[in-house]
Amino acid sequence: MLAADARYAARLKRFVRQKTFNLQTVVKNMKAEFTAIVKKDGDWWLGWVEEIPGANAQERTKEELLVSLKEAVIDILELRIEESRRQAERDFEEIPLAI
């Protein structure tokens, strides 16, 4: 396992423990796959996720960039989940949608 992957896994576990909902289950149930656009620009790797506006990062290595992009996607999904639940207020139902 790459060090970057280990850091990502550790961060995800900490993140899930801190939240009121189980994001790991949400992500697992989604079985989501996204497209990362990455490129080398001088000494830096730049990248963004096509499907998630705002999910972008800049790192020194490609491996670190991919970890940062995964973290960005998780952070954005977490915020969107929290906002959706806040807007629904109460007495709502969550239904998984398979696409």
Image (tube, helix red, strand yellow):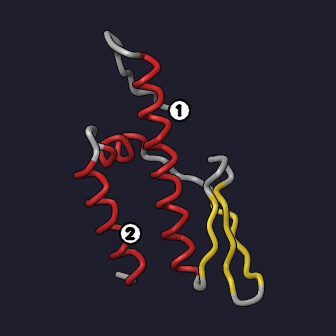
Label 1 is placed on what type of residue?
Ile
Residue drawn at point x = 73 percent, y = 81 percent? 40
- Mark 2 nearby-residue class (10 Å; few <14, some 14–19, many ≥20): some
Q: Nearer the viewer, residue 55 or 63?
A: 55
Secondary structure state at the residue bearing disc 2: helix
Label 2 is placed on what type of residue?
Tyr
Residue drawn at point x = 28 percent, y = 45 percent? 19
Q: Quadrant of the N terminus?
A: bottom left
Residue lying furthest bottom in this view? 43
Q: Which residue is mark 2?
A: 8
* Cα distance in 3D space between marks 1 and 2: 26 Å
Residue lying furthest top in this view? 91
Q: Is residue 34 left or right of residue 45?
A: left
Name which quarter of the figure residue 13 lies in.
bottom left
Q: Position of residue 84 (x, y in %)?
A: 47, 26
Secondary structure state at the residue bearing disc 1: loop
- The tag on residue 99 is 1
Relative to residue 86, is residue 20 depicted above or below?
A: below
Q: Nearer the viewer, mark 1 or mark 2?
A: 2
Residue drawn at point x = 48 percent, y = 43 percent? 77
Residue lying furthest right in this view? 41
- Mark 1 nearby-residue class (10 Å; few <14, some 14–19, many ≥20): few
Please tell me which of labels 1 and 2 falls first in the chain.
2
Q: Position of residue 95 (x, y in %)?
A: 38, 21
